[in-house]
Image (spheres, helix red, strand yellow):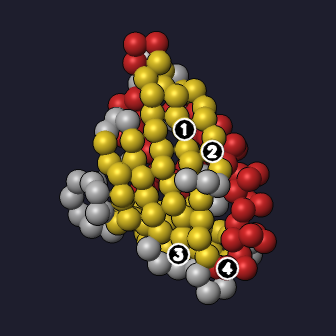
Amino acid sequence: MSGFRETIVVDRSPEDVYAYLSDASHLPEWQESAVAAEQVEEGPLGVGSHMRVTRHIGRRDIPMTMEVTEYDPPRIWGLRGIDGPVRGHVHGEIDPLDEGRRSRVTLEVDFEGHGIGRLLVPLVVRPQVRKELPRNEQHLKDRLENPTP
């Protein structure tokens, strides 16, 4: 996958990190462009599950549906956009460090545009993600290492 790749070390176990990341409701807590997110179907998350995510892109809030393409707790997950003008492709990996007391989190993100998204991806989405992804990883680290009650 080309696009963007960022890595950060988090002082939490891979199981804790994966549990947080795989809960769609947490997306707006650590991703700056995420306005809302929820799992579409009831039941456990797995390959084929869907999440509805609304992102603020440029000046608009754009809803999209993401499908889980990889699900291997507590190590690997993947998502792909299946509708909307901007469709993201996400691959994430969590590697245990210090006998599982810490985790290395790597996120790879890329996009494809459909319709108006063909213009949005190079002009708005990529520049926004270039700035946002490192900050998102720092937000993730802060949230996991300093949880609020």
Earlier residue among tags 2 and 4: 2
In this rendering, the answer to whether 16 lies above or below 25 is above
Q: Residue 5 shows which numbered tag? A: 2
Earlier residue among tags 3 and 1: 3
Question: In the rendering, at what x and y percent does residue 115 appear?
Answer: 61, 87
Residue matched to label 1: 106
Earlier residue among tags 2 and 1: 2
In this rendering, the answer to whether 145 lies above or below 101 is below
- Between disc 3 and disc 1, the foreground one is 1
- Residue 125 lies left or right of residue 31; in this view the side is right
Q: Badge 4, how many Cα within 10 Å: few under 14, some, many 20+? A: some
- Between disc 3 and disc 4, the foreground one is 4
Residue matched to label 3: 63
The answer to whether the residue labelled 3 contacts the one labelled 2, judged by CB atoms less than 8 Å apart, is: no
- Between disc 3 and disc 2, the foreground one is 2
- Is residue 54 visible in the rendered image? The answer is no
Q: Nearer the viewer, residue 72 or 10?
A: 72
